[in-house]
Amino acid sequence: MNKMKIISSLMIISFIFAGFSMFKQARHNASFVKTPQIIDETVTIGGKFKLLNQDNIEVSSDDFKGKYKVIFFGFTNCPMICPVGMEKITESLMAMDKNLVSKITPLFISVDPDRDTPEVIKEFVEGYSEVGFIGLTGDKATIEEVVKNYKIYKSKVKTEDNDPKDEMDYDMDHSAYIYIMGKDNEFINVVSSNETVTEIKKRISDAILSN
């Protein structure tokens, strides 16, 4: 899928997810997200941001200019989808040519700012330190803006496994896309975390080699 064939269906899928979440009383169903196929060149994906990294230092999107970015959105309490997605990205980058990998900064951005403090994020990304994942979080308003700019669906939900009296015991439904961004923070492509390591590796490699 090339740059002339990419997205706006992200927004459509987000609305679908919202309806599906309410209907199903919110399971963590991000694993069912498919790579979007419909493109609308008028839709802008991404944008500038200022967030806190895992060392509680404010960084901006401009700090990552000059490198390609592989960005994954999720939350540290995620039972399966996020760890699997992070592992796939890690394995994909580790299997790539080292010269290509040196041009990439992998980012994990939390969609759960209430629980994902920099300290929590740091412990999480340390599990994927082989490729130098940088974890990012922020306050609610900032995360909401980033989520909106990247057309991410997210929703805080309670399941029967959660303690109804504990406000911090909840799950998060969210879309599980892997974004490939260019050196100037421009959107290049999006990949579904459902894809295999081989497919993800190819998508990332092709995006870099063609831009």
Image (cartoon, rainbow, N blue to C red):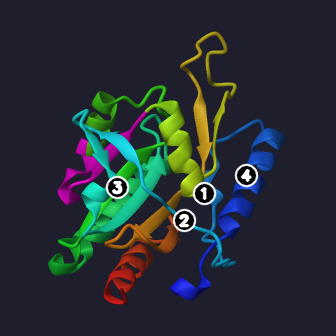
Q: Which residue is mark 4?
A: 17
Look at label 2 and name its amino acid: Ile
Label 3 or label 4, whichever comes before in sequence order: 4
Measure the alpha-carbon separation of dots 2 and 4: 18 Å
Q: Is residue 136 left or right of residue 74?
A: left
Q: Position of residue 86 (x, y in %)?
A: 38, 55
**How many angstroms separate mark 1 from mark 2 (CA)?**
7 Å
Judge left or right: residue 1 versus residue 188. right
Residue pictured at 69% horizontal, 78% vertical: 38
Q: Tell me the CA gap for discs 3 and 4.
A: 28 Å
Dot 1: element? loop
Magenta segment, which residues? Answer: 126-138
The kind of secondary structure element at disc 2 is loop
Per the image, the residue denoted by label 3 is: 61
Marks 1 and 4, how far apart at CA: 12 Å
**What is the crowding at mark 1: few (fewer than 14 residues within 10 Å), some, or many (at least 20)?**
many
Q: Earlier in the sequence, mark 1 or mark 2?
A: 2
Name the residue carrying label 1: 151
Labels 3 and 4 touching (C-beta < 8 A): no
Q: In terms of sequence position, does the residue under pointer 2 or pointer 3 come before the other?
A: 2
